[in-house]
Amino acid sequence: MRIAIDARYMRSEFSGIGEYSENLVEALAREDRENEYVVFVHSSYHGNPEIGGNFTLVPERARPVSSRTVTTFGRAVRRQNADLLHSLFPLAPITWNGRLLATIHDLQPLIDPEFTGHRGPLKRF
């Protein structure tokens, strides 16, 4: 199976989801040598995760929470011939028709908008 992981929170600046993403990718690399992985990272990411030959990092300029994620990112995933898209945050392209797995870390933006700077799930277009 060819699995695309949208890990664009992996970028030069620290974020909790970025740290989770990098740890998940490295854990998958230790455990799974059979499936192929295409990991989309933000183009500012310069890390060096411990991954095997069945992993490919693909830099992407678009921010994870952006209109491009919803509208055009599906094309990038299709170009990689992915069977499954795993979004590491609760936003996925509407143009993706394949299997989808989304990780929801918390509901804080919905429950406490004051803490998150009044950002709704899609307000940062």
Image: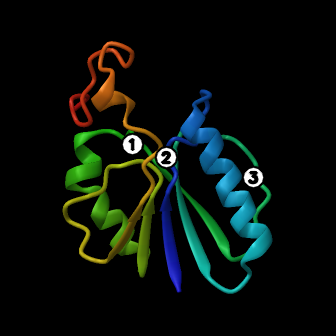
Q: Amino acid at mark 1?
A: Pro
Residue 72 in view (yes/no):
yes
Q: Residue at x 44, y 39 (%)?
A: 106
Q: Are marks 3 and 2 in contact (CB under 8 Å)?
A: no
Q: Residue at x 73, y 58 (%)?
A: 26
User: Label 2: which residue?
Assistant: 8
Q: Is residue 19 or residue 105 the one in the foreground? A: 105
How far apart are labels 3 and 2 at the CA level?
14 Å
Q: Amino acid at mark 2?
A: Arg
Rate crowding at label 3 as few (under 14), some (14 to 19) or many (20 or more) other CA atoms within 10 Å: few
Task: Report whether 58 appears left or right of 93.
Answer: right
User: Label 3: which residue?
Assistant: 49
Compared to residue 18, the image places residue 97 above or below, namely: below
Secondary structure beneath dot 2 equals loop
- Residue 33 position within the rendered picture, expressed as x and y whole percent measured from the top left: 74, 81
User: Label 1: which residue?
Assistant: 64
Q: Residue at x 61, y 32 (%)?
A: 12
